[in-house]
Structure formats: structure tokens, C-alpha cells
Image (tube, helix red, strand yellow):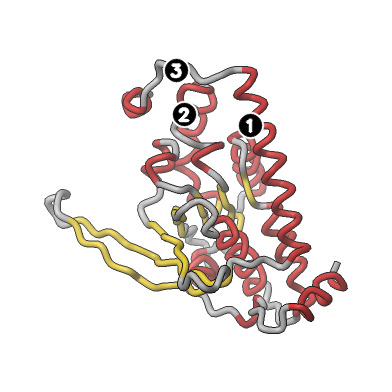
Amino acid sequence: MNEIYNEWLKQRPTYKKLREWKTGLPPLIIKAHQTKENVNKGNIARVITGDAGVGKSCYAYKIMAKTHYDFNGYTKVDEEEESYKFALENIIYRPQELFNMVQRQLDLDEQALIWTLDDASVHLGRQLFDQDREMYRKLQGTVPTLREDVSGLLITTINTGLIAKPLREFIRRKVHVMPIAELDSYRRVAKHYEKWYFPDDVRFRIAINFQDRFSCLVPQPFFDWYHQKKIKALKEYNESIMRKPIKPSDTEEEEDRGT
């Protein structure tokens, strides 16, 4: 596969490789990750929003690969393949996938490095309350303890309000992805926001902690892996909807009142 990647790089001489990319999020996740020397389990959680097709998933995919690359002290281009494979294995779509991975970490009694809940408004959206009440209740029980299971958790969605309530309550910090220039179809900026409440819990302040400039272009062989996994999950989701449509009478307010 590296031969294919190296051939692709020849066609993209200005493409910034993982070792060259300066980004603010991986160092925070690596610092939070539990090791034998650092037994305090930290957690960095972010919901990544933005317009459809702007590059939210590609940003998460690259952040995961970069985190794995830096965490392992890699320096070579040939080591990028392993990091993208790691990222692919830790992209989660279906609720049961999340529960399985949580159980795996509990059995191992250690934190995973980083996970992404991709397209969460589809697979882990607020409609899950109506689609599968049992799965929704499992999600309610699982989400509060996620910090014990994984050091970095990313969630991609067009809008935070579309994801299931347990996830909305768990993740307080937001990343918004947008184009830098219309003339360049790949250049993006990911703005990392933080919201602080005053003691009255009503007034608040919002600030940008930092901004990541990145290309939403993922090397072709690695993008193909991701695309195949995403399409498979979407097909399974659509098939499940056809078998058991969401009731037309259900409303968003019902989820907020649900237990």
C-alpha cells in the first residue's frame, strides 16, 4: 500500500504529511491518555460541526491518524499507513459498536487512545429514542463513563442539536469546520471553541482556544478505506429504516422528556 501512497504523493508534491502537520488537538489527547506513568484518566471530547461535505469526517480521520502517529513517536512517511489503519479501526458508527468497544476497554482495564463517532446525527442521533428505545437507554448508561474508556472522543455532526441527548450533555466543547478560501477546494480551518458559564449558570462567555488549518484531502488509498466503511454503515442504516420506519408522530420534545 505504501507504494500506492508514494505514487500518489508524487502527484501531490505540496501535500502536508502527518509529520509536517502542526495541529493543536493531538498533544492534548496524548497528554490526557493514561499510561503507566500517568494513572489519572483524562478525556478530551469534542463535537465537530460544519456544513455537509465541508470535511468534518476527514478532519476527525486525520486527527486520529496524527494522534496515533505522534503518540508512537513515528517520523517516517511509511509509518502513516499504520496510523490511518488505526484510525479506521476506531471510527464508530453503530451504537452496538460503541458498546462493544467500551466492554473491550473495561476488560483490558485501560483507556483507548482515541475514537470517533462519525455521522452521529444519523447513527447516534436523537431519533434513536424512537427507533430503538433499548439502545437509547444503553447509550444513557454508557456515555457518562466514556472518560474512563477513551482519552480522546470526537463526534461529527452537521449540528450539535441533532445528536442524542446523552452525547449532547457529555460534550461541552465544539469545533467548527469551514473553508478558508472558495478558490481552494481543500483548505479548511477548524475553530476550537470553549464556553464558560458565570456563577449564575445563565450568563456565559465563548472564546476560540485555537484554530487548526488543514487540508480536507486524505491520501487516496486511505480515503478509500474510510469511504467503504462509511457507505457500508449507511446502507445498513437505510435498510433498518426500511424494515422499521420511524413513527411520524414522534417529536424532538419526546426525547428531552425520555428516560
Is tag 1's residue or tag 2's residue first in the polypeptide sequence? 2
- For badge 3, the amino acid type reads Pro
Q: CA distance from mark 1 to mark 3?
A: 18 Å
Q: CA distance from mark 1 to mark 2?
A: 12 Å
Q: Which mark is residue 205?
A: none
Q: Is residue 46 left or right of residue 10?
A: left
Q: CA distance from mark 2 to mark 3?
A: 11 Å
Report the residue at 65% width, 80% height from top: 19
The secondary structure type at the circle numbered 2 is loop
> 133 or 17, which lies in front?
17
Report the residue at 39% width, 57% height from top: 174
Residue at label 3? Answer: 248
Between label 1 and label 3, give the one nearer the viewer.
Answer: 3
Q: x and y percent of residue 147 in the render?
A: 48, 51
Is tag 1's residue or tag 3's residue first in the polypeptide sequence? 1
Report the residue at 72% width, 68% height from top: 219
Residue at the front extreme, as displayed = 183
Residue at label 2? Answer: 127
* Quadrant of image for the C terminus: top left
Q: Which mark is residue 237?
A: 1
- For badge 2, the amino acid type reads Gln
Q: x and y percent of residue 33 in the render?
A: 54, 63
